Image: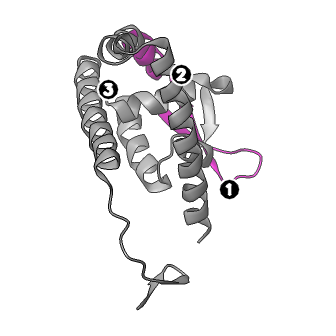
Amino acid sequence: MATKTSTRTTKKKAPRWLNPRELKAWRSYIIASRRLWDAMEGDLSPHDLSMSDYEILVHLSEAPSRQIRMSELAQSAMISKSRLSHRMKVMEKAGWVRREICKIDKRGSFAVMTEKGWKAIVKAAPDHVESIRARFVDHLTVKDQEDLARIFERVSAKMREQFSAEKDI
């Protein structure tokens, strides 16, 4: 039986079920990542920030002049343009960011961190870093940290390739 996926036709393959070792690794990752995300969200809530808001503010804080093209921000944050647009509306309402039309080509727009956005991330960063340490880093050896970095860099690279390929379809 052939199925159509986007513009490609492929033969349906039998599922490659996870063996017990693979399943344990996957479930451990999913459970830990969800718990970490929820805990980090809770730790940022006194600052009125979500993890998504914080991530966007980090990208902007690291960009020259604290601004970046919306398309580049979506790509670096690995979120869709429509999801970024929604987050930007919420963040604009909070006064943390604004959008500016690109004066050079007038086609694209920039996400720009405001002074209020800068103050928000500066205020939240010490608590956020302490949360990362207490909930994650302090439970890992140096070798664990190196292994995780290597593993997730490899997984991220593959995901970026797939993300880019899906955008091209």
Q: Nearer the viewer, residue 128 or 97?
A: 128
Crowding at mark 2 (Cα within 10 Å: few <14, some 14-19, many 20+):
few
- 138 on left or right of 4: left
Q: Distance from label 2 to label 1 (Cα)?
A: 42 Å
Q: CA distance from mark 1 to mark 3?
A: 30 Å
In the rendered view, does 131 fall on the left or right side of 71?
A: left
Q: Secondary structure at mark 2?
A: helix
Q: Secondary structure at mark 3?
A: loop
Q: 142 above or below 77? A: above
Q: Are marks 1 and 3 in contact (CB under 8 Å)?
A: no
**Where does the N terminus fall, quadrant-wise?**
bottom left
Say which amino acid is labelled 1. Answer: Arg
Q: Position of residue 157 (x, y in %)?
A: 59, 45
Instruction: Note whether residue 46 is visible.
Output: yes
Magenta-span inclusion, residue 6: no
Q: Nearer the viewer, mark 1 or mark 3?
A: 3
Q: Residue furthest right?
A: 104
Q: Tell me the quarter of the picture where residue 112 sits.
A: top right
Dot label at residue 143: none
Q: Give the residue at x 56% y 23%.
A: 61
Give me the residue at 32% from left, 14% from top.
131
Q: CA distance from mark 2 to mark 3?
A: 29 Å
Find disc 2 in the rendering and name its residue. 146
Q: Report if residue 70 is visible in the image.
A: no
| Relative depth, front residue between 165 and 32 | 32
First along the sequence among labels 2 and 1: 1
Q: Secondary structure at mark 1?
A: loop
